[in-house]
Amino acid sequence: MIKTAIIGGSGYAGGELLRLLLGHPDVTVSAVTSRSHLGEYVYQVHPNLRKRTMLKFTDPDTMEPVDVLFLALPHGEVQQKIDFWAGKADRIIDLSADFRLRDPETYAKWYGAPHAAPEWLPKFVYGLPELHRAEISQACYVSGVGCNATAANLALLPLVKASLLDPDQPVIVELKVGSSEGGAGGSPASHHPERSHVVRTFSCFGHRHTGEVMQETGLRNISLTMTSVELVRGALATVHATAKPGLTMKTLWAAYREIVNENPFVRLVREQRGIYRVPEPKILTGTNYADLGFDYDAENGHLISICAIDNLMKGASGSAVQCMNLMLGLDEMHGLDFMGLHPI
Amino acid sequence: MIKTAIIGGSGYAGGELLRLLLGHPDVTVSAVTSRSHLGEYVYQVHPNLRKRTMLKFTDPDTMEPVDVLFLALPHGEVQQKIDFWAGKADRIIDLSADFRLRDPETYAKWYGAPHAAPEWLPKFVYGLPELHRAEISQACYVSGVGCNATAANLALLPLVKASLLDPDQPVIVELKVGSSEGGAGGSPASHHPERSHVVRTFSCFGHRHTGEVMQETGLRNISLTMTSVELVRGALATVHATAKPGLTMKTLWAAYREIVNENPFVRLVREQRGIYRVPEPKILTGTNYADLGFDYDAENGHLISICAIDNLMKGASGSAVQCMNLMLGLDEMHGLDFMGLHPI
Amino acid sequence: MIKTAIIGGSGYAGGELLRLLLGHPDVTVSAVTSRSHLGEYVYQVHPNLRKRTMLKFTDPDTMEPVDVLFLALPHGEVQQKIDFWAGKADRIIDLSADFRLRDPETYAKWYGAPHAAPEWLPKFVYGLPELHRAEISQACYVSGVGCNATAANLALLPLVKASLLDPDQPVIVELKVGSSEGGAGGSPASHHPERSHVVRTFSCFGHRHTGEVMQETGLRNISLTMTSVELVRGALATVHATAKPGLTMKTLWAAYREIVNENPFVRLVREQRGIYRVPEPKILTGTNYADLGFDYDAENGHLISICAIDNLMKGASGSAVQCMNLMLGLDEMHGLDFMGLHPI
Amino acid sequence: MIKTAIIGGSGYAGGELLRLLLGHPDVTVSAVTSRSHLGEYVYQVHPNLRKRTMLKFTDPDTMEPVDVLFLALPHGEVQQKIDFWAGKADRIIDLSADFRLRDPETYAKWYGAPHAAPEWLPKFVYGLPELHRAEISQACYVSGVGCNATAANLALLPLVKASLLDPDQPVIVELKVGSSEGGAGGSPASHHPERSHVVRTFSCFGHRHTGEVMQETGLRNISLTMTSVELVRGALATVHATAKPGLTMKTLWAAYREIVNENPFVRLVREQRGIYRVPEPKILTGTNYADLGFDYDAENGHLISICAIDNLMKGASGSAVQCMNLMLGLDEMHGLDFMGLHPI
C-alpha cells in the first residue's frame, strides 16, 4: 500500500482528498495535519467521515515521510518551505496556486508578489490530466488546478486542440460558481442570509485563474467573468468564441468526441430530449466528471462551449487523486468511481 | 409628522424597522445609529433602500430627542442605560429581550444573569398587540417580542383564550426557522456551504424564548424544540397539545375564527384544495401576517396548532411598528400593508 | 377611481398585477378572470391575497367595460380577438408577446407563425417606460415586455443612448434567470427535485426575446444565452460588448448617471465596499427597480454592463402598472413603492 | 456474479438501485424495465449514469429470470401479479408498500382497499436490517421500507429495544422531509416556484407510514406529522416521548451505543462543539447511514430522539441493497460504502 499524507486537512479540498484516499484501494493515509484543529478527530470537522476513520489532526512539523504528499495549504504558504516538504516525500501534489504557473513573471502579475521559490516552478507539471497526462505520469511534482480555470480549460480543450478558433477574436468565459469555492472560512458575504440565492458577479475582469487559462490554452485575448449562484458545489463555464471561417458542425462534433474518447472523466452532453440535455454541475456533485456541451451559430461564427464540473473534485481534489494514480501507474479512475446522484 | 429614531440600525431588525418607517404615512425618521457603520450611507448596509433614503448612520451618543425611540441593540445593552434612553423620548419600543419578562427572577433564570434595571420591568408592556392591544394603546414603554415566542404564542392563543387545553398534559412546540434569526453577524455555522439546506436541530430544550411563552400563555409544562431549515426569513411553530375531554371541531373552529376576527394581521388557513392549504412562512415574507391552522384527532385528544410568521416582521419589526401605531392612536395597519408575494 | 380588470388572472403575472392594483391609491379592480379557476376565490390561487380581497375569478366572456384593461393571457391568444378586447376598454395593456414587435415579418420569424392582427401592430407602443415614456403617456394601447428582453434592454440603454458601442462588434448577453419565468404551469423540468439548484443553459441562441432587444436597441449582431439558476424571481443580464475607440471611464459614468437620473426606477450599483457592490436580483424581489452596473477594460475595449430585475415586476407586471400610471397622467411610482427586503 | 434486474427503473428509487448495483462488486444488472421510457438509454433519465452504463429500458413482460429481482413499481401494482414476479426469481425485494404490513386488515386500513394477495403477506420480511437482520438473512421475499417510517423506527429503536418508554404516554413524531419523497412525477405543488423554500405541513395525522411504525415498534399511541422543507433528499424524524420513571442519562447513552455497535450503518451524533453536533440529513446525501441523536429532560421525563437519513438510500434503495447483501450472505456494506460529502 502506498503511504500518503495530507497537509492542511481541515479545509474543503483537504477533506475531499481524505475522503477519496480513504476509499482508494491502493493507498493508506498516515497523517492529516491541521494547526487550527490539532488533536481533534477529523470527523468532527468533516462529519461525513464519522465511523469511517479515527484519524486525528496532527502537527505538520512532526510528520513522518510518506510516498505521496498532498499539500492543501492556503495560497502562498507552500512556496515558503517547499524544500522542507520535498524532504518528506518523493512525490508531491500541491493543490495551492503556488506552482501552477510556469513563468515567475506571470506569477507575480496575477498574485501581486514575486514567487518565493522560482527555481521550483519548472519542476512542477500542471495537474490537469486531460491536458498533461503523459507528463504527469513521469512527474514527481504536480500542481493542483484552479477550479474555474479547469472549467474554462476543459470547455476550450476541443476547440484549441483542433484549432477551430479564430485567433484574432476575443474569448469570453462566463463562470457561474457555488459557495464552496470560497473555502471553509466564512466572510460577511458568505453569511447565509446574505449569500442565499445570489446571482452576484464578483469579478468582471482580472480573476487570477485567467493566468492559468492563458498558459494552458495559449490564448491571449481571453477574459473570465465570475458570478456566484445558489449552489454549494459546482462550476459552469460558458465560453463565447469565434470560429475560424468555414467551421462545420461535423468538425465540431468530431473535435468533442475525440476529447471524450481520450479522457475517461470527460463526457459529452448534447441531447434533444429529456430534462438533462446540457452539462449541469448539480448532477456532478461528488464526481470527478467534466461534462461538455457546445452550440454553434454558423451564420456569424459564434461558438459556445460549456463545461460543468464539481469545483472540489475535477476542480481540485479529484484531479489531484487522478494525478496521483497516473504518477503511480495505477488505473486513472481508482478511488474516483463515484457516479453522482440523481436526483440531488 | 411623528419624529422617530432607530438605535442599532445596521442589524436586520433595525433595517426592517427603517424600511417600514420610511414607508409609513405618519412618521419621519430623524436618525439611524450604528457604531460599527458610523458615517456610512444606510443603503450601503441595507441595499434595498438605495434611492429611497440618503440617511447615514450616526452616533447614538449624539442623538436628538424624538417622539418615538426604537431600540434594536443586542440583548443586554439597553438595560444598562435605560435611563439615558428614557431621556430621549417619551415613548420607547425596545426590540431586545431586556424588557420582555416581567419577573426579574424569571429573567435571571433564562438569561443567566441578574437584570440591571429590574425597577423598569413593570413599566414595560409585552409588545404583541394580539395579546395586549389595550395596554399597548396606553403604554409609554413597550418591549419587543421573541420571534419564536411569537409563533408559539399565536399558535396557542385560540386554544388558551378559549381554555381548550387539558392543563395536566405537556405542550410541545416544534419550531422550524430561517437563518435570519441568527442576526446580521455571521458564525462558522452560518457560512453558506455549512448552513445551506440544513435541517439542524440546535435546541431541544431550554430555548430562552420559552420564558416568554410561559409568561404569556400561563402554561407551565411547555417545551420549545428549534430546528433550522433552508430559509432566510420565516418561522413555523407546530404545537402539539392535548384537548380537554369533549372538545369538538365546531368549538375549535369558533375559537380560531374569533381570534382571526379580532386581529387584522391574523388569518386562518385551512383549505381542502389548492397548493396553499396550511400556514406557510414563505408567502409571508415581508408581511406582518400571522397565519394560523389546526388539526385535531378527536379519538385521542391530540391537537395540533400551527402558526407561520416572518420572524423579522410579526416576530420583530412589524409588531414593533404595529405597537407604535397603537401607542399613537393611529390605524394599526399603517405602514404594514405589504401583502407579500406569490410566487416567491 | 379608475376601473380596471385583469384577463387571465391566475398566472404569475396576473397575480402580481392584481396585488399591485389592490395596493394602488387611484384604481379599483372590478374583475379578474380565469377559465380554469372560474368561481374560486382569488386568494386560493394567490395565497398572499387572503384577507385582502374577496374577489372571485370570473368568466372573461361576461366582463363589463372598464377604463383600463390588462391582458395576461398566454402568447398568441390576444391577437385572435383583439377587436373584442378593444370594445371593453379605451386603454389596453397586453402583457403577452403578441404586440411587442412592430414588424409582422419580424413577429413571424421569432414566433413561427404569421400574426393574426398585423393591422394592430402599429397601434401599440412597446411598454418599457425607460425607452418610451413620452409615447406611452399618449398611448391607448401598450404592449408588455419580455422579462429577459427588459434586463438586456436596460443593461444596453446607457451604452446605446450615448452611442458608446463599436457597431461592428458582436454583443453577447448572458442571462441568468429564476424559475418563475416559466409561468405557473409546471413541466417535468420544473419538478422541484429536477429544477432545484440547477445551472442549466436552456437556450444558447435564438431566444424569442432577442427580437425585442434588436427592435429596441437597433443592434443587429446580438445574441442572448439563457441559463436557469436556483431562484424563483429574478433575472440578471450580463452584456459583453466592445467600446468605440477612446472611450473613457468618465464618459461611461456620465452615460449611466444620465439614465439613472432620468428614470425613477433605475439605480446604479457600483460600490467599492460592503456586501452589495453590484446589481443583484435577490434584493429586488417584489420591487420595480432595475439596478445597473458596469465595468470596462480600457486596454482591449471590453465593456461589461449588468442589469438586475425582478422578472415579474420590472420585467412584467411592474412595468405594466408603470405604463398605466403614465397613460393616466398619474405619478409614475404610484402603487410601485415597495422597497424590497433585506435580508431575503 | 449474481444476476439482478430492476422492474420500474425510471423512478428515483429505481435509479438509485441501479447506481448501487452498477457499483456493487458481486452483482450484474441484466435488465432495467420501464414502460414509459421503453427503448431509451437509462442515462437519458438518470443523467449521472452517462458513460457508466449503456443499458436501455426494456419491457417488463419480456424479462428473463434472474437471481434477485428488485421491484420498484408504484404502490398497488406488485400485489396484482406477485405470482408472475415470483416466477422470475427465487429472491424478490419489493420496494413498494405492498408487502410491508403483515396483517391484511391493517393494510386495508392504511391503504383504503383490501390486499389483492393476502396469502403472500406472511412470506415477506420487513426489509429494515436494523430490525430484522437475522430473518432477512434467511428470507426469499423482503419488502422495502417507508422512508418516513424508517426515520421514525430507527429514532425509536434504542428506546423500544431497551424498554425505556412509558407505555401509557403518546409518542409524537415530527418529520421534516425533502421533495424527492414525492417521486419522479411532478404535481402542481412540486412546481419549483411553489415548492421552493416551503415549510409546508402536508399531513398532521394519519400518514400511511404510521402503520409501519406501529407494526415495527409495537407502539399504539403514536402519530406522525409531516412537513416538507427545502431539500431534495433527506428526512429528519424528531420523536417526542415520555421516559419510564427513573431513567438516567447513563442508561440512555448505553441504549444508543448498543444500537450503534450492532449496526454498521447507524451512527451516534452528539457533540458538544463544532458545527455538526446533531444528526442532519444533508451530510447523509447518497449514503446509507442513519444518524441518531437524543436529549432528555430528566425533570419531566421528556425524551427527544432524532434520526436523520437519506430517504432514497436508508429509506429505500440503500436498505434494499443491504437486504440483498444479507440474503446472499455477502458483506452487509458491499456496494454501500459511499461516505457522503462535506460540504454539500
Image: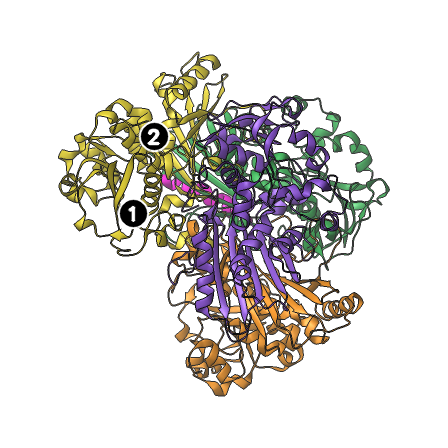
Chain colours: A yellow, B orange, C green, D purple
Do the residues at discs 2 and 1 belong to one chain? no
Where residue B143 appears, as percent x and y from the top left, is: 54, 76
Residue type indicated by callout 1? Gly
- Compared with C247, B160 (above or below) is below
Where residue D241 appears, as percent x and y from the top left, is: 58, 65
Residue type indicated by callout 2? Asn
Relative to D73, is B93 on the left or the right?
A: left
Q: Which residue is mark 2?
A: C300
Per the model, the C-alpha gap separating discs 2 and 1 is 41 Å
Q: Residue at x 33, y 33 (%)?
A: A319
Q: Which quadrant, please, contains the N terminus of chain A?
A: top left
Q: Which residues are magenta?
A: C249-265
> Can residue B228 be seen at all in this image of the molecule?
no
Near-viewer residue (B320 or C241):
B320
Query: Which secondary structure dominates the residues rendered in magenta?
Result: helix
Q: Is residue C38 magenta?
A: no
Q: Which residue is mark 1?
A: A9
SS under mark 1: loop
Where residue C66 appears, as percent x and y from the top left, is: 80, 46
Near-viewer residue (D147 or D168):
D168
Residue that sits furthest to the right in the current view: C62
Q: Residue at x 72, y 41 (%)?
A: D119
Q: Is residue C260 magenta?
A: yes
Where residue D34 appears, as percent x and y from the top left, is: 63, 28
Q: Chain of mark 1?
A: A
In the rendering, which numbered label is found on residue C274? none
